[in-house]
Amino acid sequence: MSTISRDEVARLAGLARIDLTDAELTRLAGELDVIVESVARVQEVATDDVPATSHPIPLTNVFRADVAEEPLTVEQALSGAPDAEDGRFSVPQILGEEA
Amino acid sequence: MGDDLTRRSAADLAGLLAAGEVTSVELTQAHLDRIAAVDGAVHAYLHVSPDEALATARVVDARRTAGDELHPLAGVPIAVKDVVVTEGMPTTAGSKILEGWVPPYDATLVTRIKAAGMPILGKTNMDEFAMGSSTEHSAYGNTHNPWDLDRIPGGSGGGSAAAVGAFEAPLAIGTDTGGSIRQPAAVTGTVGVKPTYGSVSRYGLIALASSLDQAGPVTRTVLDAALLHEVIGGHDPRDATSLPEALPPLVAAARQGLTGDLSGVRVGVVTELSGDGYQPGVRASFEAALDVLRGAGAQISEVSCPHFGHALAAYYLILPSEASSNLAKFDGMRYGLRVLPQDGPATAERVMAATRGAGFGDEVKRRIILGTYALSAGYYDAYYGSAQKVRTLIQRDFAAAFEQVDVLVSPTAPTTAFKLGEKLDDPLAMYLNDVATIPANLAGVPGLSVPSGLSDDGLPVGFQVLAPARADDRLYRVGAALETLLEASWGAPLLSRAPELSGSTTEGSAR
């Protein structure tokens, strides 16, 4: 039973913003098929009466004291940037040609 | 004395420092020399920081001479897994996408290590973004198991475990999302602890799966792990998932365990974490350790956790889902790699895709795509939603089990260290390495791995102890008792039986 086709992997890679080569697409389709078939076992015991758990040890209303802290300096924040200009991150054009 | 300093426990070294029998500079230099001698073969480190480590050591020595009050571990050096950010020291998480990145801030646990006056020797190798069980998914080459350089050191924290196991550091920091502290400890004959979720701050850890990640100690003795856990643990207002209450007394629990008396302690053997899939030599070592616990006065019984059989499947939906979200920040805009598309317009979106295509390795791509699938419209309820329900069932299994017993035990990993390359092309086979360690992460409970001996193949076996959330002290008591009784029967620590590494000929036979 094939659940994840090569086209589906290409669609997911687009959603995840990862360029994949043709060889990667083909290999991942095969691998993900096997993995998804295996992990689908969770459905065997996940009946309607079982609540979902998102967090191992839930805490609620977590606040810290409302006191200002020293943030990173602009220099520090930009220190790892691929490109920076005038104290700002320099990034490629945000919108495509058609926009 | 110089040559055998690297073989001593952190607790012993702290004693020597306090007594003035050795300086932190001597101690730090001894470990730097050891790294220079053997790390070419082991490759536990991605970055070594001799200047910073020696500078810290000099400060601590001066303060000690001046009579300042110091932390008990002040001057004892430590290695830090490369997934933990360190100000001014490269941090890559084993990924090409962060090659050369130097963080502008420290993780809280690093702040605490520095406050304690512990020299940081360097950053240790790991599977890329902690995704893996063998350290073979590092973008910077394999780490080798000190017991057999052709075998894996476990993962994702194979670098930290190998560094400690090869006497390149007395202490190290690991992180454990599904077993990445405990499984490397098991296959290298060292000790590793995954604390209760929230016991150690996650601030400054490069997140893999935020509801599962937990940092903890990687050491050669249980007492050392307790000492280090007390340095790095406790509430941190910068981590909203940090537990507000104080740690239980961990060092005291380890010392109590070292008396070798476990009278009245109820130990449950998890039915589902044994049998098929566990190597005969692993099972034999585990059974022998149970006899030792029985001899120490513990009451051993078998406890069933019926949903543990579904833990691995739930984990490989929850982890990729959370990872696909957490790793979205690697977009080539603010830090790390930026790759321009080979043709067409260089829009932000296309730059991001080109950067991630070039910067992420195979396993990271595999898990991000899997997580994107599990979270996508039409599949969410069937996969991610169902996995979250399994998580509830596993928590209930633990709750029921801990009404009957004080701790649960199992082998830490189903096999001893396998050969490098053996499982690299079979993701599912690789995932099975974590079958016994994953339930603890899903439920947030603490777990420890301590060596139980050698298997019939001459390689180390790990014994796992699990305790209820917030009862990490129980791990240290039971772990220390087992350790001290086993070492008494062996006549020496297990690591003394590891082969000498090349370059260690100058070390003599001292230990």
Image (spheres, coloured by chain):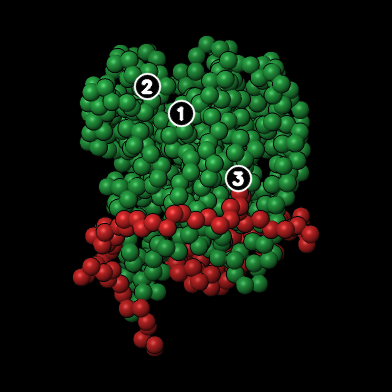
Can you tell which mark lies on residue B444? 3
Pointer 2 and pointer 1: residues touching (CB < 8 Å)? Answer: yes
Residue B70 at least partly seen: yes
Residue density around tag 2, few if under 14, some if 14–19, many if 20 or more, within 10 Å? many
Q: Amino acid at mark 1?
A: Leu
Q: Is residue B254 left or right of residue A85?
A: right
Q: Residue at x 34, y 47 (%)?
A: B106
Can you tell which mark lies on residue B227? 1
Q: Which chain is green?
A: B
Are the numbered discs 3 and 2 placed on the same chain, yes or no?
A: yes
In whole angstroms, how far apart are the C-alphas of marks 3 and 2?
Answer: 32 Å
**Is B43 located above or below residue B489 in the figure?**
below
Are the numbered discs 2 and 1 placed on the same chain, yes or no?
A: yes
Q: Residue furthest bottom?
A: A98
Residue B305 quadrant: top right
- Badge 2 is on which residue? B14
Q: Which chain is red?
A: A
